[in-house]
Amino acid sequence: MKLLNVRLSPEDEAMAAELRAGGIAMSELVRDAIRTEYGRRRRRLRPEDVDALLADIYARHPDPAGPARSRPDIHDRRAFREAFRRRVRSETER
């Protein structure tokens, strides 16, 4: 097993001494902290987490107001060409 040597500030040293005096093993405390942080970083998203995450994104970035832009049928080359021309014209007029 690898030995981990950590430098402590005077405040951290005082807290560690008080914890040790209270019967807390520093090795267990460090292992628990490492496992907790590792678990937090490697957390798997559950479906309910994804739903909440998406709801938050949609709340921060709502769809623009006004009617939705119609999309041409990309399989109809004439409809797509006409829609493309309209869009390019409208952007160049700005």
Image (spheres, helix red, strand yellow):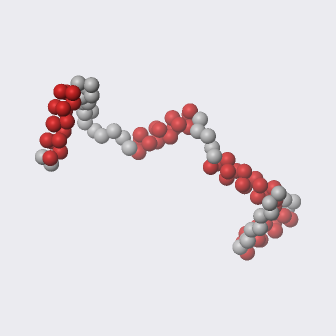
Report the side of 30 relative to 42 (left or right).
right
Q: Residue furthest bottom?
A: 10
Can residue 24 be seen from the camera position used here?
no
Q: 39 and 51: which one is in front?
A: 39
Rendered view: 12 above or below 52: below
For residue 75, side relative to residue 20 (left or right): left
Location of residue 39 in the rendering, given as x and y in whole percent from the top left corner = 67, 47
Quadrant the N terminus occupies = bottom right
Horizontally, residue 57 falls left or right of residue 19, namely: left
- Point 15% across, 36% down: residue: 86
Image quadrant in which you'd find residue 19: bottom right
Residue at point 87%, 60% (across, down): 23
The x and y percentages for residue 81 are: 18, 32
Answer whether residue 92 is visible to the viewer in this image.
yes
Question: In the image, residue 51 lies at what x, y percent?
Answer: 51, 35
Residue 31, picture quadrant: bottom right
> Between 2 and 17, which is closer to the camera in this rendering?
2
Q: Residue at x 73, y 71 (%)?
A: 8
Residue 2 appears left or right of 68: right
Count of picture labels: 0
Residue 5 is situated, as x and y percent measured from the top left of the image, at: 77, 67
